[in-house]
Image (spheres, grey):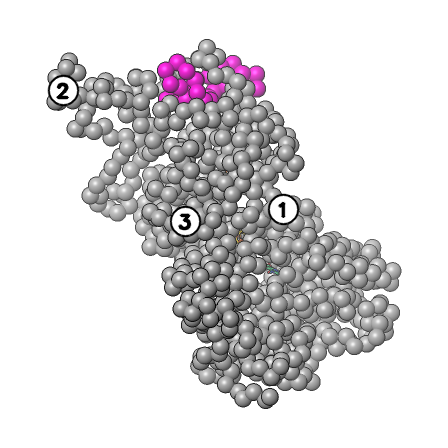
Amino acid sequence: MGIKLLLDKAHVEGIRYFDVYRREGGYRSVEKALKTMSPEAIVEEVKKSGLRGRGGAGFPTGMKWSFIAKPEGVPRHLVCNADESEPGTFKDRYLMEFLPHVLIEGLIISSFALGSNATYIYIRGEYAWIPDILEQAIAEAKANGFLGKNILGTGFDCEIYVQRGAGAYICGEETALIESLEGKRGNPRIKPPFPAIQGLWMRPTVVNNVETLAAVVPIINMGGEEYAKIGVGKSTGTKLISACGNINKPGVYEIDMTISVEEFIYSEEYCGGIANGKRLKACIPGGSSVPILPANLLFKTAKGETRYMNYESLSDGGFATGSMMGSGGFIVLDEDQCVVKHTYTLARFYRHESCGQCSPCREGTGWMEKILKKIDSGKGEMKDIDLLWDIQRRIEGNTICPLGDAAAWPVAAAIRHFRDEFEWHVLNPEESQKRNYGLAHYADAREVVA
Amino acid sequence: MSEVQKFKVTIDNITIEVAPGTTILEAARKIGGEVAPPAMCFYSKLKGSGGKCRTCLVEVSKGSEKDPRPMPKLVASCRTTVMDGMEVKNITSEKVPDARAGVVEFLLLNHPLDCPICDQAGECHLQDLSYEHGREGTRYEFQKRVFKKHDLGPYIQLHMTRCILCYRCVFTADQLTNKRVHGILDRGDHAEIATHIEKALDNDFIGNVIDVCPVGALTDKTFRFKNRVWFTKPVDAHRDCPTCSGEVQLWMRGDEVFRVTARKDEWGEVKENSKGETGWICNECRFEKKHIHDWTIEGPSVINRHSVISQGHYVGITKPKETVQEVIGKEPRLLMDIHSVSQVNKPNIDLSLINGPAHSDDFNHPNTNGKQD
Ligand SMILES: Cc1cc2nc3c(=O)[nH]c(=O)nc-3n(C[C@H](O)[C@H](O)[C@H](O)COP(=O)(O)O)c2cc1C
Ligand code: SF4
Ligand code: SF4
Ligand code: FES
């Protein structure tokens, strides 16, 4: 069994409620942090832990916290990003639904460290039942003196508010989230200024992912240095992975980042192998935005080294032969899946979710979707494949926010690794409507146990 | 930091000193000519505008004197401020023309290309942009998005099909009127300019959205299909107006006033008026005063941009600055200028003095004896 820091109590009955959570050792870190540590010391501890943002980009959290501006007399805010809308990602939901107090506990310490007296949780609208769970947890924490005025007699005041989104993926982008929280249309802002200088209501703001903020709890409990000993290299601590697709045991797993991708997919402790005795064709290791990898590049890097479930190893080889840790949405495709259809599905998503502010993303996502639909329905031409490549190339890097890149990367990676499958669709329009291209050279070579 | 401190920035090999806080685009406009990147959404008079269309992308090949690293991506020059010692490549960049051609292609993807029936034709920034930076054909082979035309009140018509979602009209309504009643609904390529429930845009200054719209999405209903802009002559005029400065441009043919707009500068933006404020004009001046007696005529407008609207105006114009020679360090082979008077067919009168477009009669014809004096 791997180390568990966030989900270790997930199986305890009633852990969703304050009394049980407290009895199991919950809120110790708040007592420790608020009573014995200064805000600066907490930031220092988080820096030492090596914690990297779990929202997708993997930016070092301690460093992000130290950037927050502290102008005299201006309130600061912490915002928890619970918009979790990236296809394949559902780890934050699990945490909030079953262990809401871990998040609230992390939020209290983080608010103290950043000097936020009003902290917000922005949660995606489709998680309709979770705000109630969070609000109950907040009310319980407040009733027990962990929130509200003069927390634990330390003089620190903090309120946590839950705000529901209205169902837009783009509102997960931190500046769009801030706009939405302010009651405006969820368009990403043009940066600079960055949120750390001018964020919510033009006040210094830190936006962090749910899992990032929850991870502050074990960091304070065990100390940053101890936390940094778990994992490997710059991938410290544990990471929640939401595994889905054609595997035997889809679900949310907490891993320490030393296990290999192969172990993660095939071991009984995690995914339990490919479902229905099929073979593995491809995998998107970090949520829909990151490049898809064929099986032959998934278990081994281009250099032939074992690929591990961590930030460095997953991105080994850059985009040419690697991918990204992303948000931890682990999507597995078996031999029956069609990469063209799959890419079309993702393109449809990005087209639907583009905010439409900047022209390359607004127009390019719609165009890619139409071409992919054309190829998928057996009407494609060879030139369409090159055209797709050219369009994604002109979107990437030329947009306001990373959604443009996120729309371009899956298309680029699909063509890069599965061009033969696209070409087969063009050359065999009728057959492509009846069956899948198959596995070709990129399948996992392992024998199927029937 | 002393107040007189200036930042040195080099754009396309031309160095200029500007105040800190100046954007790359503003600095490039100070140099002028081709060095200034095209801007479809930025509008210097509208706070918060810019950053969206991505036509103004430039390459920063040197970040600053202190940190000389180049910027990894192309940046929107309208929203990126200069640093001391920064070096920028616009027309000299290898990446910019490609990215810009891409942006033009994206902007035209769903555009109806109905210039022949669009009132904006001739003064449309998207037309200019595609001539200068676009490619000759399109690779898009699908149905374009369509919207119905909408009347936004008695004066303004919205052709959503032509809109490039630059948000300028939204900022205008925010910043010029007391209550904005239109905005952007929906998102992505299905986003549209709309009033939530059919509402008229009625505010004394709302007509200015027509002037800021870079394309023919918002047009003047009182001018609709009345004339082509290149057949009309821009004339500066003013009146005593209780609401605005009353300083306008009349678009005339003979004695007839076809259209009234604010006065524009060489970047197509509303100019400052004599009081030093942005010369937005009120609805009454724009839509209701279409008689020559309503106005005191000052004289022909000075046009200083490359545009077909100056085609009836071969003299009495300020030419836009020519920077090509400075940028490439040598005389270009061929420079064509819409303002140049043909040496082959030299007109025998000052063309700005005649009404309407020039006709063959107005030129010297060596072969026709009768017409020459
Ligand atoms: C289109 C888009 C969607 C995003 N959605 C989410 C999201 O749902 N949840 C999240 O935590 N971060 C999301 N992010 C990343 C956030 O912008 C931001 O980087 C993150 O919340 C920072 O938190 P972290 O440093 O803790 O990772 C998204 C980014 C983009 C560009
Ligand atoms: S990249 Fe897409 S989602 Fe992001 S600001 Fe531009 S149009 Fe909006
Ligand atoms: S209507 Fe015109 S000004 Fe308004 S967003 Fe569209 S193109 Fe821009
Ligand atoms: S003018 Fe700069 S992005 Fe539109």
Do discs 3 and 2 share a chain?
A: yes
Q: Tell me: is circle 3 under 8 Å from ligand 4.
A: no
Asked whether the beta carbons under mark 1 and mark 2 sit within 8 Å of each other, the answer is: no
Label 2 SS: loop
Q: Is residue B310 above or below residue A376?
A: above
Q: Tell me: is circle 1 under 8 Å from ligand 2.
A: no
10 Å crowding of disc 3: few (<14), some (14-19), many (20+): many
Which one is closest to the eye, mark 3 or mark 2? 2
Q: Position of residue B357 (x, y in %)?
A: 31, 22
* Three-letter residue code for mark 2: Thr
Q: Quadrant of residue A334?
A: bottom right
User: Which residue is denoted by mark 3 in the rendering?
Assistant: B105
Disc 3 to disc 2, how far (Cα)?
A: 47 Å
Q: Magenta stretch: dominant SS?
A: strand
User: Which residue is denoted by mark 1 in the rendering?
Assistant: A185
Residue A280 visible from this viewpoint: yes
Q: What is the total number of numbered labels drawn onto the structure image?
A: 3
Taking A273 as reference, is A5 left or right?
Answer: right
Q: Position of residue A288 (x, y in %)?
A: 57, 66
The circle drawn on residue B368 is 2
Query: Is residue B241 in the magenta section?
Result: yes
Q: Quadrant of residue B215?
A: top left
Asked whether the beta carbons under mark 3 and mark 2 sit within 8 Å of each other, the answer is: no
Region rendered in magenta: B233-260
Q: Position of residue A3 (x, y in %)?
A: 69, 81
Which one is closest to the eye, mark 1 or mark 2? 2
Residue A226 visible from this viewpoint: no
Query: Is residue B203 in the magenta section?
Result: no
Q: Chain of mark 3?
A: B
